[in-house]
Amino acid sequence: MSHQIVTVHEEDDGIRLDRWFKRHYPDIPHGLVQKLLRKGAIKVGGKKAETSTRISAGQEIRVPHVNERPQEEVYVPKPKYEATFEDAQRLLIDNILYEDQHMIAFNKPAGLAAQGGSKIKLSVDSLLYFLAQGGSKPKLVHRIDKDTSGVMIVAKSAKAATELGKRFKEKTLEKTYWAIVVGEPEIPSGKISMPVLAKKSDGKNEKSVVDESEGKPAITLYRIIEKAARRLSWMELQPVTGRMHQLRVHMSAIGHPIVGDGKYGGTDAFIEGISEKMHLHARRIVIPNFYGKKIDVKAPLPPHMEETFEMMGFEPQHH
């Protein structure tokens, strides 16, 4: 593959290599840049590099002529909405926690939906277009509520998507959430077992309710990690089943709604002086054996929860 040597200018000093490509070669997809880097077709200062490599003024970058490649190898359908590489960088790429040849795990920001809809312009799914490799964008294998932050996994291939999908469906992985709830549950640890029914409106799931007669079995394991004068509790929640909004419904049903969850906790979910954003975070995912190795990914807290933890004197670094 023929190439050109490009010298880094002063205004690009210190930026990441992927940002440099987006700035000067916007037609080369992020996924293709990654692939060319792995193959050694792109070099910085004569050496192999990564998308996160910081470049310096005066360095020489070897840029291959990618237009010699068959077009179908790099074609990926564009997202429905006008997502940009900068959106993908800020919301996904800068939040990558783990990556291998099969999957990517990132810390999904609160407020970002997993998939698009009539009123949703940006979603994880639309931003995955910018992580496309070899003609296919990574695939969603599970979902997290829009207002919940934390570990989210996507698959890099159809085969990996099938494997991961099976793990999520068969519950052969461990999901742990952190939540700040109103008040203090009387029993410090235990199991909530209440059937949950997803109510529909205009054919769409709108809200879930505890329904003993029509609901599907739903089980949540919980324990209090720390508490603040019976006002708030920091809890660890593990969903054994995966019903819609299960953790939110269960905590509200036992009288301790998640802080910021007005949908299920009403006005009781809001505490004066504390952020009104949802205080539910997908803290950790553990997959015991995925292609021969244990995957264990933890996500740091979002800023609004970090602020609440500090205010309450909770110490997440010890857990």
Image: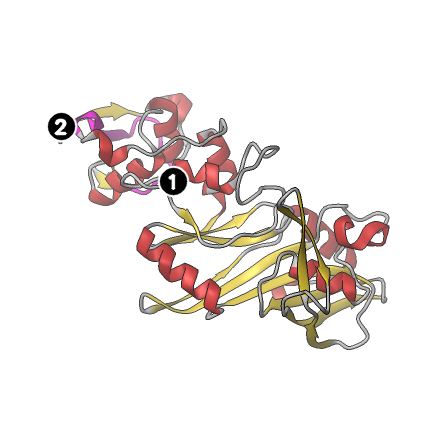
| Left or right: 281 as drawn, with respect to 174 | right
Residue 184 lies in what quarter of the image? bottom right
| Left or right: 5 as drawn, with respect to 130 | left
Residue identifier under label 2: 2
Callout 2: helix, strand or loop?
loop
| Label 1 packing within 10 angstroms: few (<14), some (14-19), many (20+) | many
Is any atom of residue 236 visible in this view?
Answer: yes
Q: Nearer the viewer, mark 2 or mark 1?
A: 1
Q: Residue at position x 76%, y 54% from top?
A: 264
Is any atom of residue 44 visible in this view?
Answer: no
Residue identifier under label 1: 131
Tell me which secondary structure the magenta stretch mostly adopts.
loop
Question: Going by the picture, which residue comes out furthest to the left?
Answer: 1
Instruction: Please name whichever residue, 64 or 55, is drawn nearer the observer in this view of the structure.
Output: 64
Cα–Cα span, label 2 and label 1: 24 Å
For residue 222, above or below residue 159: below
For residue 187, above or below residue 271: below
Instruction: Please name whichever residue, 87 or 50, is drawn nearer the observer in this view of the structure.
Output: 87
Callout 1: helix, strand or loop?
helix
First of labels 2, 1 by sequence position: 2
Magenta-drawn segment: 49-68
| Left or right: 149 as drawn, with respect to 54 | right
Q: Residue at position x 23%, y 41% from top?
A: 47
Question: Colour scheme of this structure image?
Answer: secondary structure
Q: Amino acid at mark 1?
A: Leu
Instruction: Please name whichever residue, 287 or 243, is drawn nearer the observer in this view of the structure.
Output: 243
Q: Amino acid at mark 2?
A: Ser
Instruction: Please name whichever residue, 145 or 65, is drawn nearer the observer in this view of the structure.
Output: 145
